[in-house]
Amino acid sequence: MIHPSDWIDLTGKVAHVTGAAHGIGEAIATALAAAGAKVVVSDVNGEGAAKVAAAIGGASMVLDVADRDAVDSALEQTATEHGALDILVNNAGVYIGLGGPVRDITDEMWRKLWSINVDGVFYCCRAAARIMIAAGTRGRIINIASTQSVTPGVGVTYDGSKAAVLQITKALALELAPHGINVNALAPGPTWVQGGAPPKVDGRPPSPSGDPLADTVADRIARLPAGHWGDPMEQGKAAVFLASAMSDFVTGAYLPVDGGWLLL
Ligand SMILES: NC(=O)c1ccc[n+]([C@@H]2O[C@H](COP(=O)([O-])OP(=O)(O)OC[C@H]3O[C@@H](n4cnc5c(N)ncnc54)[C@H](O)[C@@H]3O)[C@@H](O)[C@H]2O)c1
């Protein structure tokens, strides 16, 4: 007798979610814990991470994913303190203050964003692969990409970084499949993480500002087929799918959870 609920049961699994003090990462950590996993919540914001961990019965640690040595220690610590590293969610990522038109991007902005969105993903994937392969863990790595991995819109720093995350995901999926490790990219569309009610999606594009980047995004949000912004828990649900036996034969996939953004 098949019980599909068994397929999403993560009891006994250990997950590490980066950037999980807020927003999509918080929702993913909450969803994985609700499915039964022991979740380690990490973030540069240690206080926020501790609050989320306390709410979901998990553990927390301070981690800057751009710090290679700290990443190696944090994932080792996860595995030694909790017995394994079964699931890694590379969620930490930034945009605000580091994007925009190319003429305004400084070297420092470029390097800062890529150090978190790309170097951070690489460091965490490498550390997790070493731990999972050594332990013989048939693990899961979920990289939080974006709709901007395949369509530009918010600028060269962020769009480029999320395209890199997608190709890193595919390259690792190919390399790690023989070890039984699945690597997939979850691509959120517009997801309201600012608190309070999201702005209405009323189908009427705003008047053009002359900035093609800003206009593309504003226009698409206004015409989003789903008719509303995404709740962070939509990403949490998809992460449970990618972390669980529901997706045993899924690797190297790009899963948009975007309310139809990519249809436009
Ligand atoms: N919200 C959206 O509409 C959307 C859409 C597509 C993709 N994404 C992606 O989803 C992920 C989460 O975004 P969000 O909207 O929840 O953002 P958010 O700002 O609400 O949360 C990001 C978290 O990452 C943490 N963080 C920042 N720098 C860090 C670092 N160096 N090391 C560890 N943690 C760090 C922050 O403290 C914060 O808690 C990001 O990768 C983002 O690019 C978001």
Image (cartoon, rainbow, N blue to C red):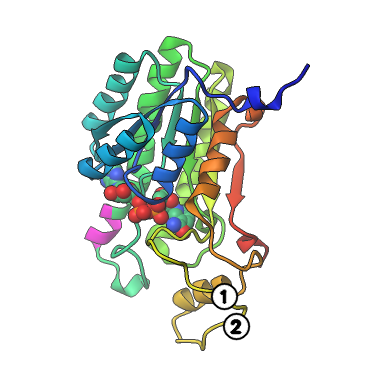
| Mark nearer the N terminus (1 vs 2) | 2
What is the x, y in percent for residue 112?
Answer: 26, 53
Cβ(mark 1) to ligand 1 < 8 Å?
Answer: no
Amino acid type of the residue that numbered disc 1 sits on in the rendered structure:
Ala
Amino acid type of the residue that numbered disc 2 sits on in the rendered structure:
Arg
Task: Name the outermost residue toward the right.
Answer: 1
Relative to 64, does residue 163 appear above or below in the rendering?
A: below
**Residue segment shown in magenta:** 107-112
- Circles 1, 2 touching at the beta carbon (< 8 Å): yes
Q: In screen coordinates, is 200 left or right of 52?
A: right
- SS at badge 2: loop
Q: Which mark is residue 204?
A: 2
Q: Quadrant of the C terminus?
A: bottom right
Relative to 9, does residue 230 appear above or below in the rendering?
A: below
Disc 2: CA contacts within 10 A as few (<14), some (14-19) or many (>=20): few
Residue toward you, 256 or 152: 256
- SS at badge 1: helix
Q: In screen coordinates, is 116 left or right of 183?
A: left
Q: Which mark is residue 222?
A: 1
Write down the quadrant of residue 91 in the picture: top left
Q: Residue at x 32, y 74 (%)?
A: 103
Q: In screen coordinates, is 109 left or right of 91?
A: left
What is the x, y in percent for residue 193?
Answer: 41, 58
Disc 1: CA contacts within 10 A as few (<14), some (14-19) or many (>=20): many
Q: Quadrant of the N terminus?
A: top right
What is the x, y in percent for residue 10?
Answer: 53, 24
**Which secondary structure is most common in the magenta stretch?**
helix
Give the CA distance from mark 1 to mark 2.
6 Å
Q: Residue at x 23, y 37 (%)?
A: 67
Residue toward you, 263 or 159: 263
